Amino acid sequence: MSLRKDTGEWRLLRFLNDLTYEFLDLSLPRSYRSRTALLRAFFGLDSKSKKFTESDWQRYKKLFSATLTRLKRKGYIVRQRTGNQFSWKMSQQGKKTIEDFQGDVLPEDGISRLFVFDIPESKRYYRDWIRIELVASGYALLQKSVWFGTRPLGESFLKELVGKDLFQYIHFFEVKDEGTLRNLVPEQ
C-alpha cells in the first residue's frame, strides 16, 4: 500500500515513529487540552488566532481517530491492549515505511543554506507542509518563513515543490564562501 508524504496519515505515522512513548501518553482527553493543542498544532489543525469550541474539539477528535483507523487498516500501526488500557504501536510495515522515507534526508555537508518562502493564505496547507518537511530535514526557523540548514534538501521534496507549483513562492540560497560581506565593504 502506498502512502503520500503530504497527508495527515504520513504526519501521524512519522509522529508515532518519532515520539512513540510520548504519543502513548496522549489519549486526547478533554482535561489535557494543553497537550492536545500541541498535537493538533503539530498536524496543522490549529490556527494561532482561533479559539476552539466544543464542536471543533469533537471534529478534531474524530479526524484523529479516523486517521488512526486508516493507518491500522493499511497495516502501519497496531492497537494493543494491556489490561484495560489500549495503546498504539508502529508495525514492522510502518517502521519500514518511515525508514524508506527517512532515507531521503541527506547528510550534513557543512554548506549553510537559507530556505525562504512567501506562500499566499489560499495555499496555507502547503506552508504547514513545507515547515514539517524543513524540520524533518534538520532546518531551523530563523524568522517567519526563513529557515536555515546545513544539509541539502531531498530530491523527492524538491520534486513535490515543483509538482505542487510552489517554486514561484520560494527562494533557496547556498552560502559557499564565508566572509562575502567583508569583501563588499572596503576596509577603513
Image (cartoon, grey):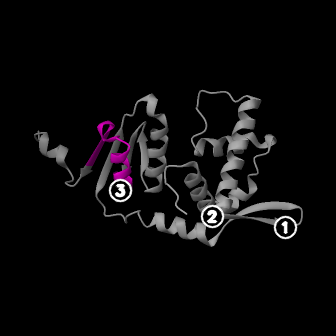
Instruction: Name, please, the residue furthest toward the right.
Output: 84
Which mark sits nearer the N-terminus, 2 or 3?
2
Residues drawn in magenta = 157-173
The amino acid beneath tag 2 is Tyr
Q: Give the Cα separation between the discs numbered 3 and 1.
A: 41 Å
Q: Quadrant of the N terminus?
A: bottom right
In the rendered image, which quarter is residue 150 located in? bottom left
The residue sitting at 67% across, 63% down in the picture is: 77
Of residue 40 and residue 111, the one placed in the foreground of this image is 40
Q: Which residue is mark 2?
A: 76
Q: Position of residue 40 (x, y in %)?
A: 64, 42
Q: Position of residue 82 (x, y in %)?
A: 84, 67
Assess whether residue 133 is covered by the magenta stretch: no
In the structure shown, which secondary structural element does the residue marked by tag 3 occupy? loop
Q: Residues within 10 Å of mark 1 (few under 14, many from 20)?
A: few
Q: Up-down: is 59 above or below 89?
A: above
In the rendered image, which quarter is residue 46 located in? top right
The residue sitting at 53% across, 65% down in the picture is: 98
Q: Position of residue 33 (x, y in %)?
A: 74, 40
Assess whether residue 164 is covered by the magenta stretch: yes
The amino acid beneath tag 1 is Thr
Left or right for 65, reference 15: right
The amino acid beneath tag 3 is Leu
In the structure shown, which secondary structural element does the residue marked by tag 2 occupy? loop
The residue sitting at 52% across, 61% down in the picture is: 2
Which mark sits nearer the N-terminus, 1 or 2?
2
Q: Which residue is mark 1?
A: 82
Of residue 76 and residue 132, the one placed in the foreground of this image is 76
Query: Disc 1 vs disc 2: which is toward the camera?
Result: 2
Q: Of the numbered discs in the image, which one, if any, rests on residue 153?
A: 3
